[in-house]
Amino acid sequence: MNDTVKYVLDETRIPKFWYNLQADLPKPLPPVLHPGTGKPIGPDDLAPLFPMALIMQEVTTEREVEIPGPVRDVYRQWRPTPLYRARRLEKALQTPARIYYKYEGVSPAGSHKPNTAVAQAFYNKEAGVKRLITETGAGQWGSSLAFAGALFGLDVQVYMVRVSYDQKPYRRALMETYGARCIASPSNETQSGRAILAQRADHPGSLGIAISEAVEVAAQNDDAKYALGSVLNHVLLHQTVIGQESIAQMEMADDYPDVIVGCTGGGSNFAGIAFPFLGAALRGGQKIRIVAVEPAACPSLTRGTYAYDFGDTAHLTPLTKMHTLGSTFTPPGFHAGGLRYHGMAPLVSHLKELGLIEAIAYHQIGVFDAGVQFARAEGILPAPEANHAVKGAIDQALLCREEGVSRAILFNLCGHGHFDMQAYIDYFGGKLSDRGYDEKELAMALAGLPSVTEPA
């Protein structure tokens, strides 16, 4: 047997439906609230930002949502994605654990993000939208929406967090190759951006600020809509093709995960791998441990408050109940830019509150150590974000070694690091540091959480 075993499904096994975890929750999600009235919002409140098809996916509790034919046709370009048994890594760790990883880096944009970008572009095109406005951290989402926009003939405008805009020029170039316009955020193009720059001219930016700029532009232009790469229910829904394929591939391997690990920033790739397995467990199937791994410099799940908060810095979005560090919180400029968000997806936060998932935070040097170890064993260079999942899986495998127990560990390798080589150059050059967040800034941001009474 080869050291690495690849489990690949035929393209006819691409899921025909997205899986909606809300159908199987033991307790429903808290409602999304209007920031002015404090009352639950309705579909019309979201209409300036999203087409109605996506709004209905945001609120549905149906277990299955059919994937449109044109979206599945695009998925066929890279789906089903492979699932690997990491035998060389197991050997290097001297662990009895069985380590599997689902590899989403084979998509044209190099990550899991096109799973929702293609869907969002399709529904916006169907609704007659001409332009999509969005934000991006590390550039994975911006690249993916630019790719999807090119396929469906939509203009795409991306506000990219300034520190990542400077750190990751190749991601910027990829967006431009697909035809998108990429702007460093905060910018002088929006009222939200100008307000931030007036306070600090060299502001490094944050996803919350970039979201404010994108939402502002989308809301002010009738031909434009807003697109988001994580956090919202419909985005997490679209990613569940990952976990559904993984269930079928684990059957091919005659195995089933005891532990699932995923990196978490806003929650989309984590949801993609974990939600179908969790749903099966909630319906009476095999119980599993699910571990969300986040950066210690932006630890919303492990350090944030579970409360209603804005999804953006300028307070243009509705209020959602989530684990949050405060909408004005700006994390330090660590390299895993896609995990640099002040809040966590409401669905993921809800699961944490229900005790259905665990969370752990790691500093960046340790996760780069893990990513390099993985690359030297398996040959795939992970994105800095994905290194968090690699580190989590390795730690679980080492725990198996200490306990003398064999467990199946599955993690989502959500993207490759080919456009993140400066991060690895800095790592090998000893230029990375384990930067913590500013405790005073966090306290101030949390003190500014909106005062909300949750509806009965």
Image (cartoon, helix red, strand yellow):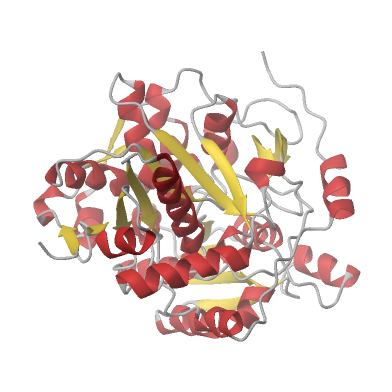
Q: Is residue 250 above or below residue 169?
A: above
> Is residue 155 visible to the viewer in this orientation of the structure?
no
| Closer to us: 369 or 276 | 369
Q: Quadrant of the N terminus?
A: bottom left
Residue 449 x/y as whole percent: 81, 39
Q: Residue at x 71, y 61 (%)?
A: 209
Q: Is residue 307 left or right of residue 106?
A: right
Q: Nearer the viewer, residue 341 or 386?
A: 386
> Residue 135 vs residue 372: left or right?
right
Residue at 32 percent of width and 66 percent of height: 152
Q: Residue at x 72, y 39 (%)?
A: 309
Foreground residue, 48 or 111?
Answer: 111
Residue 16 occupies quadrant:
top left
Give x and y (percent) for residue 148: 36, 66
Query: Residue 220 at what x, y percent from top left?
Result: 65, 58
Q: Is residue 95 above or below residue 318?
A: below
